[in-house]
């Protein structure tokens, strides 16, 4: 007998009534379960944190003539400033940093005496460009002062001043302490348009907030924060509410303290979470996701998804999955957070860590 393709098709297409009925039945209901855990349960709030610094200040040049221009900016982010750092050039004239308690308030000439002369001499001694002064020389601009200052100028490729020229106060920015450049320095251009950079003489910290910038009223000082870096260590937080002005001050070599991540020239009223974290834990990163622990269970216990709990006449109930069967177990909820609940059960219920509880039993 010859079997044609049509014959094969008809034979394969023929099905009994039993086969058709079986295919028409709905598929078996699917069950979604979750494992019972034994752990602490925490009520957490996701935050976004960025590296910040305490004691932030703007680096500005003072006592310059109107229309003065930065012809060179010579600092980089991360640089530490102290005595004798070249930070910029204004109208072709170098500007250095010194350490002291006040700004140089006048141009000084040979023989000038006063606390500003002492500050300059002390700074040059600190740089190693001259020997310590004694007697009246401590407070006096001498030829030795000019010689030592000339070494500083020459080191950076500038022609030294001669003793007939005044030492311009505008060539020096006096810092209260060593400071780190923590922002990208500005570019060349008009001096009065913006400060050189943002400085900090404090330590690194994390400034954290919720996405969108509005911090929950549940947040409080003393709560603990955990970085989402895989580590389990937590750090205490401080809630800060500051209103600060970021306008440049009218005198002096530095400006008012600036709020974290704020822009110059505005008044900021901001609430954020500050966290002191060892720099070794930051790994060179500048931005982190974190969890703030608002509160937590006092001790570990059985934890299940809250969606596994429903209410019956007996109270809060879960369905314990045992093979293909389920059994209702009455539970007591002791703590809930972030979609999970900690429960207590009566002894002998066989609901323990690792048990499977039913979340849903859906049919498509």
Image (cartoon, helix red, strand yellow):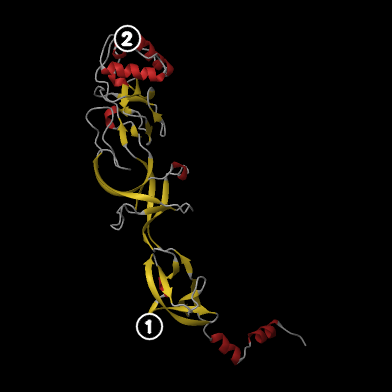
Residue at the disc numbered 1: 314
- Say which residue appears at 29% left-offset and 28% top-offset: 190
- Say which residue appears at 37% left-offset and 42% top-offset: 52
- Say which residue appears at 27% left-offset and 14% top-offset: 108
State whether residue 146 is above or below residue 279. Answer: above
Q: Can you give x and y, in whole percent of width and height, for residue 124 in the image?
A: 37, 17
For residue 9, side relative to residue 310 (left or right): right
For residue 61, side relative to residue 125 (left or right): left
Q: How many marks?
A: 2
Residue at the disc numbered 2: 142
State whether residue 206 is above or below residue 255. Answer: below
Q: Can you give x and y, in whole percent of width and height, for residue 133 in the image?
A: 35, 13
State whether residue 117 is above or below residue 37. Answer: above
Q: Secondary structure at mark 1?
A: loop
Q: Nearer the viewer, residue 283 or 96?
A: 283
- Say which residue appears at 66% left-offset and 83% top-offset: 9
Residue that lies at the very extreme toward the bottom in this rendered image = 17
Q: Can you give x and y, in whole percent of width and height, for residue 6 in the image?
A: 68, 84
Residue that lies at the very extreme toward the left in this rendered image = 250
Density class for disc 1 (Cα within 10 Å; few <14, some 14-19, many ≥20) is few
Residue that lies at the very extreme toward the right in this rendered image = 1
């Amino acid at each position: 007998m010859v079997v044609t393709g049509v014959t094969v098709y008809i034979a394969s297409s023929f099905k009994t009534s039993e086969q058709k009925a079986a295919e028409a039945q709905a598929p078996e209901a699917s069950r979604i379960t979750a494992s019972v855990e034994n752990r602490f349960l925490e009520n957490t709030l996701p935050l976004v944190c960025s590296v910040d610094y305490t004691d932030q200040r703007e680096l500005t040049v003072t006592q310059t003539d109107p229309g003065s221009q930065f012809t060179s900016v010579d600092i980089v982010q991360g640089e530490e400033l102290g005595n004798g750092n070249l930070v910029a050039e204004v109208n072709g004239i170098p500007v250095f940093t010194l350490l002291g308690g006040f700004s140089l308030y006048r141009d000084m000439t040979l023989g000038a005496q006063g606390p500003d002369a002492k500050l300059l001499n002390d700074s040059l001694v600190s740089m190693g460009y001259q020997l310590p002064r004694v007697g009246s020389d401590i407070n006096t601009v001498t030829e030795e002062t000019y010689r030592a200052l000339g070494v500083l100028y020459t080191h950076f490729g500038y022609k030294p001043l001669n003793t007939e020229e005044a030492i311009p106060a505008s060539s020096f920015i006096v810092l209260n302490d060593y400071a780190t450049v923590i922002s990208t320095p500005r570019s060349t251009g008009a001096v009065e348009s913006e400060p050189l950079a943002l400085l900090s003489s404090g330590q690194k910290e994390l400034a954290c907030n919720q996405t969108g910038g509005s911090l929950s009223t549940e947040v409080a000082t003393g709560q603990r924060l955990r970085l989402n870096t895989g580590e389990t260590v937590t750090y205490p937080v401080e809630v800060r509410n500051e209103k600060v002005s970021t306008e440049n001050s009218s005198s002096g070599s530095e400006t008012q303290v600036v709020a974290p991540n704020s822009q110059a020239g505005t008044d900021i009223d901001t609430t954020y979470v500050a966290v002191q974290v060892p720099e070794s834990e930051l790994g060179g990163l500048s931005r982190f996701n974190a969890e703030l622990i608002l509160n937590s269970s006092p001790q570990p216990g059985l934890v299940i998804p809250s969606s596994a709990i429903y209410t019956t006449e007996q109270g809060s109930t879960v369905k314990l999955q045992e093979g293909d069967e389920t059994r209702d177990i009455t539970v007591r909820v002791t703590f809930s957070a972030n979609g999970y609940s900690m429960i207590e059960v009566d002894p002998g219920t066989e609901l323990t860590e690792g048990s499977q509880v039913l979340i849903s039993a859906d049919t498509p």
